Image (cartoon, rainbow, N blue to C red):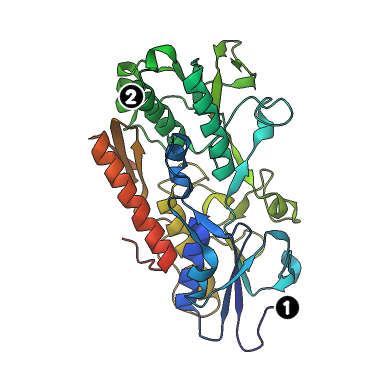
């Protein structure tokens, strides 16, 4: 099927997460009435994945979700429930389950997928670990913890070298500690946290404000930790580090590194060696000017100040802002409005770590050098604020009201 109208332009957004929805709504506001916006996404639903940590510990897994079709249709955006199976950039064409679709501009916001092949034991026949990336993985981890409560044993939680979703690992180990104390099981279930980061609280962009807070929290809660580790493999009862140390583990939950979406990766000349779409400061593909990318699926071709790395922090807030900027620039390239003024917003990282009985508010901002803030909050206040943040973002993404501060 050819979906480019002779009366207008056609912009396709691949992905229906934070960045994809923000891009689609922004495009619809900026393009002309005869221009079409189509979102291509396979699941049919938006999932607030940042709250799946608490779903592992018993909360409803369907909170913070909504159906994409009615939300997009209400805003005049077409929706195709399918994955993008191939991008033929030279032809300005994508292949989906419904056939071929041409585009004038394409925005790739497909997110990432776990690179479970990076460490033996994370996947395959001898898989011995869990992670929390999507709904299915959260359900599996929840079942393992349910069995653990009946048969207590040591737990290892952490982030594998190369992982970027650090805050979920920190939140999980703190929240699990709180739940175990409530159940009277904490003395029977030792907790160990492992990470490839050089110190606790390093979120990947010179974030150091949280270090002392987390070190103090871990010491007070008797959570053992190892930083700067390599993981050699994961077995059914142990996590073996590169140093040779064996950490006993009845349950292991380890956040893996990400790679790009498989079908995007297989498209010729579209991604780097890790499957991410390389973009310049305009969110434009470094080789194909009609293709843009945002969110987890993308990687800058150079560090964009104040970030000191090419990968941006993975938060819903920043993914939304990246999607908006990519859409503004794509629309501007078609003659609709000015491009985004800045690549990154002044405040580029805002997150809450809900650790049950205690929490942390983390923020980073700046234009040339990152400034960081970490504030310890009471657990009930953190839980309330995080729920409010989730409802706010979900409401914005469901209704298309994208005028974020």
Residue at 55% across, 44% down: 135
Tell me: residue 293, above or below residue 158.
Answer: below
Mark 1, residues whose alpha carbon is within 10 Å: few (<14), some, or many (≥20)? few
Q: Name the residue at the bottom extreme.
A: 7
Residue at 33% across, 24% down: 182
In this rendering, the label closer to the viewer, 2 or 1? 2
Tell me: residue 243, above or below residue 118.
Answer: above
Residue at 55% across, 17% down: 249
Q: Quadrant of residue 170?
A: top left
Residue receiving disc 2: 182
Q: Name the residue at the front extreme.
A: 150
- Using residue 56 as the reference point, say whether residue 187 is left or right of it: left
Upstream in the sequence, badge 2 or badge 1? Answer: 1
Local SS, label 2: helix
x, y (%) of residue 386?
33, 45
Q: Quadrant of the C terminus?
A: bottom left
Q: Does residue 217 show up?
A: yes
x, y (%) of residue 36?
58, 79
Tell me: residue 204, above or below residue 385.
Answer: above
Residue receiving disc 1: 2
Give the mark count: 2
């Amino acid at each position: 099927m050819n979906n480019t109208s002779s009366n207008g332009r056609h912009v396709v957004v691949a992905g229906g997460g934070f960045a994809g929805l923000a891009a689609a709504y922004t495009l619809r506001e900026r393009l002309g009435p005869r221009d079409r916006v189509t979102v291509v996404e396979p699941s049919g639903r938006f999932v607030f994945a940042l709250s799946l940590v608490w779903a592992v510990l018993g909360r409803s897994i369907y909170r913070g979700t909504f159906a994409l079709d009615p939300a997009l249709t209400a805003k005049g955006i077409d929706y195709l429930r399918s994955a993008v199976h191939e991008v033929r950039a030279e032809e300005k064409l994508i292949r989906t389950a419904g056939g071929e679709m041409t585009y004038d501009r394409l925005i790739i916001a497909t997110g990432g997928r776990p690179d479970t092949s990076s460490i033996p034991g994370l996947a395959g026949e001898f898989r011995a670990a869990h992670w929390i990336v999507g709904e299915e993985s959260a359900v599996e981890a929840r079942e393992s913890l349910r069995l653990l409560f009946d048969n207590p044993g040591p737990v290892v939680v952490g982030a594998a070298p190369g992982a970027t979703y650090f805050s979920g690992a920190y939140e999980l180990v703190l929240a699990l500690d709180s739940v175990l104390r409530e159940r009277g099981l904490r003395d029977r279930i030792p907790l160990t946290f492992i990470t490839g980061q050089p110190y606790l609280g390093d979120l990947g962009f010179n974030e150091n404000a949280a270090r002392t807070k987390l070190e103090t929290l871990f010491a007070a809660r008797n959570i053992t930790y190892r930083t700067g580790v390599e993981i050699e493999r994961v077995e059914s009862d142990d996590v073996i580090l590169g140093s040779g140390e064996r950490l006993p583990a009845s349950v292991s939950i380890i956040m893996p590194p990400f790679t790009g979406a498989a079908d995007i990766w297989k498209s010729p000349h579209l991604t780097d060696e890790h499957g991410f779409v390389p973009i310049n400061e305009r969110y434009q593909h470094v080789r194909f000017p009609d293709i843009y990318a945002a969110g987890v699926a993308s990687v800058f071709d150079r560090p964009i100040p104040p970030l000191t790395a090419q990968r941006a922090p993975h938060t819903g807030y920043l993914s939304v802002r990246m999607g908006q900027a990519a859409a503004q620039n794509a629309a501007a390239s078609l003659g609709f409005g000015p491009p985004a003024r800045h690549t990154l917003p002044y405040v580029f990282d805002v997150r809450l770590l809900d650790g049950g009985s205690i929490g942390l508010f983390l923020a980073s901002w700046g234009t040339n050098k990152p400034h960081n803030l970490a504030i310890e909050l009471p657990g009930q206040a953190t839980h309330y604020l995080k729920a409010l943040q989730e409802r706010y973002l979900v409401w914005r993404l469901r209704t298309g009201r994208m005028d974020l501060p």
